[in-house]
Image (tube, grey):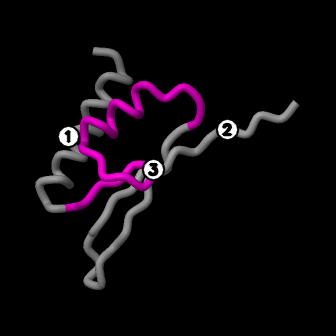
Amino acid sequence: MKSYEAAYQSLFAELKNYEKSGVSMLMDGYRASPIQIVEAHLTKEEGTYMRDYIMDPEGYIKTLTFNKIKKNHRQ
């Protein structure tokens, strides 16, 4: 198995665990499933996704967001 395949399988497993724990997941402001997030990472053409954790008052992860970061092209 290629390393990138293992990385995406690991990401999917991690996100499924968050989902089972009741953590909401958003991608670019919209609700997303673990498979949608992994597919977006697989098909990204330019840029990458930045992960952000939103905590509840007790310090537990409430929401996990992924926002696309575009590369700035200067000429």
Q: Which residue is mark 2?
A: 71
Answer with left or right where residue 45 lies relative to residue 57. right
Please report whichever mark, 1 or 3, sits nearer to the chain's N-terminal start. 1
Q: CA distance from mark 1 to mark 3?
A: 21 Å
| Image spot of residue 68 (x, y percent) | 52, 44
Q: From the viewer's perspective, is 47 left or right of 73?
A: left
Q: Earlier in the sequence, mark 1 or mark 2?
A: 1
Considering the numbered disc 1 on the image, is that residue within a helix, a strand or a loop?
helix
How would you rate the neighbour count of disc 1 (Cα within 10 Å): few for under 14, some for 14-19, many for 20 or more?
some
Residue drawn at 32 percent across, 22 percent down: 5
Residue lying at 39% horizontally and 49% vertically, measured from the top left? 27
Q: On the rendered image, what quadrant is the N terminus found in?
A: top left
- In the image, 37 versus 59, the foreground residue is 37
Amino acid tagged 1: Ala
Report if residue 43 lies within the magenta region: yes
Q: Earlier in the sequence, mark 2 or mark 3?
A: 3
Q: Is residue 59 above or below residue 1?
A: below
Question: How many neighbours does mark 2 have within 10 angstroms: few (below 14), some (14-19), or many (20 or more)?
Answer: few
Total labels drawn: 3
Rendered location of residue 52, percent (x, y)? 43, 59
Q: Residue at x 38, y 63 (%)?
A: 53
Q: Quadrant of residue 43 in the image?
A: top left
According to the picture, the residue beneath numbered tag 3 turns out to be 28
Q: Which residues are magenta?
A: 23-47
Q: Find the distance from the CA under tag 1 to the CA under tag 2.
A: 28 Å
Q: Locate residue 22 relative to residue 32 in the image: left or right.
A: left
Q: Residue at x 30, y 54 (%)?
A: 25
- Counting from the top left corner in percent of width and height, residue 65 is at 39, 56
User: Which residue has dot 1 on it?
Assistant: 13
- Distance in Å between CA atoms under marks 2 and 3: 16 Å
Q: Nearer the viewer, residue 37 or 60?
A: 37
Q: Nearer the viewer, mark 1 or mark 2?
A: 2
